[in-house]
Structures are given as structure tokens and as C-alpha cells.
Amino acid sequence: MRTEPIAGPSGPPVPVARTLHWGRWVSAAVALAVAGWLVYLVVVNPHLDWGKVAEYLFNDRILAGVWVTIEISVLATALGLVLGVLVAVMRLAHNPVLSALASGYIWFFRGTPVLVQLIFWYNLAFLFPELVLKIPFTMIGLKWDTNQVMTGFTSAMLGLGLNLAAYFAETVRAGIQAVDRGQTEAAYALGMTPAKRMRVIVLPQALRIIIPPTGNEFISMLKTTSLVYVVAGHDLMTNASQIYKANNRIMELLIVASVWYMLMTAVATFLQGRLERRFGSDAVRLVRGGGAAARVLPKVAA
Amino acid sequence: MNPGVKSAESAESGVESGVEPVVLASGVRMGYGGVQVLNGVDFAVAPGEVSCIIGPSGSGKSTFLRCLNGLEPVLGGSLRVLGEEVGHTLRDGRYHPWTPKEFAAFRKNIGMVFQRFNLFAHQSALENVACGPVHVLDTPQDRARTLAMEHLDRVGLADHAHKRPHQLSGGQQQRVAIARALAMSPTLMLFDEPTSALDPELVDEVLEVMKGLAAEGMTMVVVTHEIAFAREVGDRLTFFADGVVVEQGGPRELLAAPAHERTRAFLSSVLGSEDGRS
Ligand SMILES: Nc1ncnc2c1ncn2[C@@H]1O[C@H](COP(=O)(O)OP(=O)(O)OP(=O)(O)O)[C@@H](O)[C@H]1O
Ligand SMILES: [Mg+2]
């Protein structure tokens, strides 16, 4: 809205009148009233003990759960990202078998609920009571009891990581395909092998497109970990639920858990903002074309 | 005499008996998904020769150039480049297809400059030029950078070494692309319409670099619409149409007195009102 007076071709400047936006004020007031009323209903609710919320907010088990949630989120995201890149590269490979396997992987893990996958990994011992890693045709190798390996924590990490990989592979594939094909040809013309071209030319550019969405993946992972409570992974949700099963303070503990989830999400969102500023639209523009974009966009002086 | 060279025109080219030609194509055929693009191309380039190719759009010039360094597969005939049958090695009485590694090793010696520059967008001009030596020839980083700087200096871009491609004009990008190809010390340079994506005022700076290269005796195959360049710098001129060589010869003679109706029609459309037939 302009506040500075307008000076005509001649004569003194004329001030600009203020416009009143009645519609805006009314709709804002109504929305505030509704929201305030809902909050009020919860805050003054006689069945809710805010003292308990405060008491459990820094409870040792809650804090330990927060820590486990962060651990599972970070590890599962890391696993998902690495595996996702691998699956994407396989998916784009000329080898039809590799490509089909990657498609199958993506289809399977995106086609089944993550809850089902978590329970599956946790109960892997029903299928394979022992996990064996040995050199074929020899007796040299290692053996583990599946139930000891597949704790809530590892099955959570595996389940969430493998699942993320399937989704992330599609992001990576889009990133790789966004890199201008001309650069691939230039790399081949220089004498690079397909693998070297992928590593030196394509992936470094694709990463700039891929990295910003990883922030979103991590944020949604923080909350998806709450599913881990079905396999008792000692994460925030598992511990909160164990406490409320003992003392029946369900609402209070859900509020405690929510406060922590919101806090973690806020921190992750802040970090994501910084990530995006570093690898954001500018990088995407860089990748999409030295060719067309370079001529449309103004030249940047050095 | 090389048995592969059939046409009378090629026989009088710079390819003399005894000297192995850099490029020797005979009856090269190629197509995309059943559609024939090259219908038996005969073409030869002697060492040190600058060979220009002109022809209407869609006549297969780019496709032929891309066959020369194996970016497109030859489907028929014989194509020998730098003494090798492109894409195959003769062993035990049979031709064995190359692996990606063998293709890569072959391409090290052939520089290619594209119409759309195709610089690596995430690297500075200097990194672009150093990229081949570092990643393909395993030249140590600092040595590669020194060399890259020399090549950039040669194309007049030492001051722009640390700019990204998008910060450079089209003409500057194309000169970086030439420097990038030269950094591999190639024996043969391929140019695919290197100036057609440029604004008219930027064409000359690129052509100057190419003239310098020709003067130094680099073997070059240049697909171009710059008739003046072909006349002035080229040793031979080849006219392509519908995937075959319609005629070839010394550029001055061919431009002054084209033997075929198609060549005449093409030349008059390219030269237009400009009087290029001096
Ligand atoms: N990747 C491809 N797939 C299918 N057809 C193609 C492909 N590339 C080129 N062609 C076709 O092959 C023919 C020859 O193309 P080419 O690019 O070699 O022509 P050109 O002489 O270089 O033309 P221009 O002067 O426009 O660059 C054209 O008809 C084109 O449509
Ligand atoms: Mg072309």
C-alpha cells in the first residue's frame, strides 16, 4: 500500500487516501474467536491436569525417548538416503534386470504400509531364527540369534530406512534426470566412462536438487517414528505410552509427547531453511541449464 | 590407394597413398529406430586437414559427426577413425564390440565442441577445462589447473577463469568448451555448428579461436553454416543431403561452381542476398 504522496507533472504532491479493508478485519476476528474458544476449552478442562504435564515434560524416560527418536530418525534417514541413491541409479541403469529389480523394490515398499513393514522386521525370527553370514561352500562365517539382532530399535531403523529409500529413490531419479543431457554427452566426449560421468558430473549437480527435499523427509521421519511404539522401540511415543498405560494420564502424556515432537520439528525446520538457502532455487537454476537459462537470465558481474 | 575410398572426389582429397587418414568412412549407414539417417557416407580426412561439412537441416551432419567419436553407433559400412574401426576391435578373425571403457579410451584423443556448449554447470571455467585431465588422464590437480589456465589464456579467457558457465556470454562459454576439448591434447577436433547458438556479434570471437587452431595444423571436422569460414579456413568442403555426400571438393571451387542442383539450391538459400561467391 502506497503511503508516499503522489507528485503530479506540476503542482504540489497530493497525499494518498487510506483504504479500510472491512472484510479482512471481520474474518480475522471470527477466526481468532473460534481458535481462542477451542484453546480455552482445552486449557480450562477439569479432566486435564496441567501439573502432570509439567511434571512429565522432563521425566527421565521421556527425555531418553526423545533421544532415541532423534537417533532412529537420523539413522533411518541416512540409511534411506544412501539406499535411495543406489536404487535410483539402478533404476536408471541400462541393465534391464537391475532396472526391474529397482522398480520392484520401489513398488513393494511404497505399496505396503510402513506399519506392516515395521512389524515384519520385528518378527523376522519367525522366518529366520538365525542370521548367518558366511563365505559360500566353507564353514567360515558369523551367526546371530535373530531375536537379539531385531530389537525394536534395529527393526525400526530398518523398516523406516528401507521405506524411505523407496520414496527417496524417486526424488533422486528426478534429480538425476534434471541434469541436462548435453553435459552427459560432453563427459563421454571427454573420455569418461558412464560410472565416472555419474560420479563427477551428474550426481554433484543432482544433489543440489535432491538435498532440499531431504529436510522434509527428515521432518516427516521424526513423526513417523511414533509408529515404532508398536515394536516397543523405546522411542518418545513408546515411553510415553508405557507411562500412560501405568498411570492412565493419557491426555497429559500425549501433550508432553506433542510438545517434544513440535520442538524437534521446529529445530529441524530451522535447519532445513538454512539447507534450502544454501542449495535452493539458485542451484536448481544452475543445474537446469548453462544453455537456455544463461541467455534468459541477466549476466552476473564478477 | 585406400580401397575404402570409392568416389572420385575423395581420391583427389588430401588423403595420399601411404599416409594413414585420420578419418576414413566408406558406406557408413546409421538410423534411429528403423528410420535411415545416413545412407552410405563416403568421407575422408587427412592429418592436418580442416574439413567442413554443410547441408540442409536434418541431412544427418550431426549424426555423422557423432558417429566419428562413437556417440552414435554405426550400423553399416566401415568407419575408421585414428586407425581404429569405431566401436569394434578385430581379434581372432572377428570384430568384437567395445566395452564402455574402450569407448572412453578411444574418445580421449578426440575433442568435441557442441552447438549448445554443454559446459559442466557446477564447475567454474577453470574446473571445466581441468576436468578431463584430472578425471580421465589422472593429471595431478595443480598441474591440471596450471595447464587449464594456459588453455583459457589461449582462448582469451584467463580473466574469467573463476566464473561459472551461467556468468559467461555464449561466445565465452563456447571458447571455454574449446579449451576444455583442447586440454585433452586431442589428435582430432570435431565441431558441431559451434556458432549457431550465438548472437551474431559473438560469432567472430569463436571463429578466430578456430582459425588459430587450424593454422597450428590441428585436424578438424567442422559442421557449419559459416560459408565464409569454410571458404577461408577449410581445406575441403563436403555437402550433405539426405544422409549421403552429394559432392565434395576444395571449398573455393565447390562454392564457385557447384556441380549438383541440390548444392546450388542450398547455397543460394544460405547465402541469400549476401554475395558470397567471390
Ligand atoms: N535421437 C534421435 N532420435 C531419433 N531421430 C533422430 C535423433 N537425432 C536425430 N534424429 C533424426 O535424424 C535426422 C538427422 O539429424 P541430424 O541432427 O544429424 O541432422 P543435421 O544435419 O545435424 O541437422 P541440423 O542442421 O538441424 O543440425 C533428422 O531427421 C532427425 O530428426
Ligand atoms: Mg546438427
Image (cartoon, helix red, strand yellow):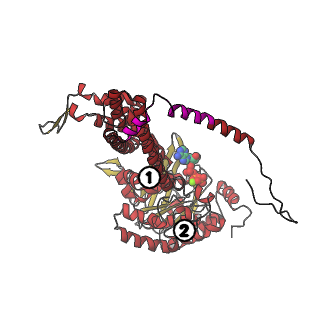
Hey, what amino acid is under mark 2?
Asp
Q: Are marks 1 and 2 on the same chain?
A: no
Task: Identify the residue at image location x=64%, y=59%.
Answer: B259
The percent position of residue A25, horizontal first and vertical second, equals 70, 41
The percent position of residue A245, horizontal first and vertical second, equals 34, 27
Instruction: Give the mark toward the camera: 1 or 2.
Output: 1
The percent position of residue B207, horizontal first and vertical second, equals 58, 69
Query: In terms of depth relative to the viewer, which is nearer, B227 or A285?
Result: A285
> Can residue B95 be seen from the camera position used here?
yes
Query: In terms of depth relative to the viewer, which is nearer, B80 or A7?
Result: A7
Q: Dot 2 surroundings within 10 Å: few (below 14), some, or many (20 or more)?
A: many
As displayed, is residue B49 above or below residue A47?
Answer: below
Is residue B254 highlighted in magenta? no
Q: Which residue is mark 1?
A: A202
> Chain under label 2?
B
Query: In terms of depth relative to the viewer, which is nearer, A180 or B199?
Result: A180
Task: Identify the residue at image location x=42%, y=44%.
Answer: A264
User: In 3D space, how far apart are the residues under numbered discs 1 and 2 (Cα atoms)?
Assistant: 38 Å
Task: Identify the residue at image location x=49%, y=74%.
Answer: B153
- Residue B84's mark? none
Quadrant of the frame with the C terminus of chain B: bottom right
> Chain under label 1?
A
Secondary element at image label 2: loop
Q: Which residue is mark 2?
A: B235
Task: Identify the residue at image location x=63%, y=35%.
Answer: A33
As displayed, is residue B159 above or below residue A183?
Answer: below
Where residue A223 sits, quadrant-wise, is: top left
Secondary element at image label 1: helix
Query: In terms of depth relative to the viewer, which is nearer, B63 or A157?
Result: A157
The percent position of residue A122, horizontal first and vertical second, equals 29, 30
Magenta residue span: A33-58
